[in-house]
Image (tube, rainbow, N blue to C red):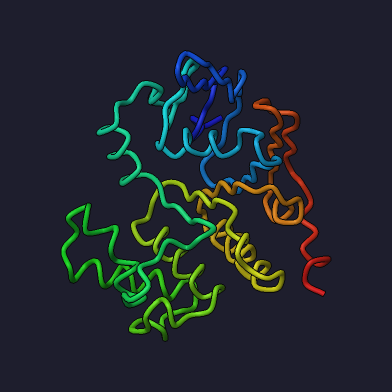
Amino acid sequence: MPTPLIKLKDIHKDYVNDDVVTSVLHGVSFAIQEGEFVAIMGPSGSGKSTLMHILGFLDTVSSGVYQFKGQDVSRLVDDQLAIMRRKEVGFVFQSFNLLPRTSVLENVALPMIYDQIPEAERKVLAEKALKIVGLDHRLEHLSNQLSGGERQRVAIARAVAGNPSIIFADEPTGNLDTRTGVEVLKMFQELHTKGRTIIMITHEQEAAEFAERIISIRDGQIISDRTGHKRRTDRYTK
């Protein structure tokens, strides 16, 4: 068995405010292999967002071990977390997080500036990513001239452009109508078939069904981890 891309062992997360301790995660353990498409599903307040923040190097654990590519990253400091995020992770958010009066191409290329990738190379990588999501004909359009579905596809292109080890999608269909949401979820499936590792955070069973594995979390604990799940996409396309 290859070394997991992600391995969590007995993860706990507490927040302390004025000596009041709020426990959010309680002994979370699981592993994710490279190339998996995993949905982490749970209701509001279940701890799924906190879990994503830890997995995506936006936050640290209170106790337990987080291994990424076999390396213990549980106690990284802020600067180290920022480097890991930049090198290893692509994010897709519910609110798109695009600059409204900036071109589609510039929105996709922007994060690569921080990696000091030369301008010409950024342009090539951004164009390639936009072709993957079917928006290579919209390069010079401003992001605020696009539909919601197109803006989410730009966000996906931005996430994949730097070839990260993993893509996190945080409620990626939350601002989309049903049909457009299905199109976006199918795009994640297509990226997955090409070898991308995808972790999607969602509270919707319908969205989770598009993943090959569903980890359900409630009250800060894993309540089920289903592998080999049959994806019933037909019922959402009628």
Q: Nearer the viewer, residue 112 or 36?
A: 112
| Residue 131 position in % (x across, y down) | 43, 76
The vertical placement of 167 against 149, above or below, is above
Q: Residue at left 53%, top 16%?
A: 21
Percent of width and height locating residue 201: 60, 46
Q: How many labels does the image show?
A: 0
Residue at horizontal 22%, vertical 53%? 114
The residue under the point 36% across, 21% down is 75
Figure quadrant of the C terminus: bottom right
Q: Is residue 234 left or right of residue 169?
A: right
Question: Which residue is at a point 58% across and 64% down the rendered structure image?
Answer: 190
Horizontal arrangement in the rendering, residue 123 relative to residue 74 (left or right) = left
Dividing the picture into quarters, in which one does residue 217 lie?
top right
From what the image shows, is residue 55 above or below residue 87? above
On the rendered structure, is 92 left or right of 237? left
Quarter of the picture containing the N terminus is: top right
Rendering quarter of residue 145: bottom left
Eyeballing the image, is 83 above or below 178?
above
Query: Which of the two residues, 95 or 109, is positioned nearer the viewer here?
Result: 95
Task: Point out residue 105 in the picture as x, y percentages from the top left corner.
Answer: 32, 75
**Residue 110 quadrant:** bottom left
Q: Nearer the viewer, residue 41 or 231?
A: 41
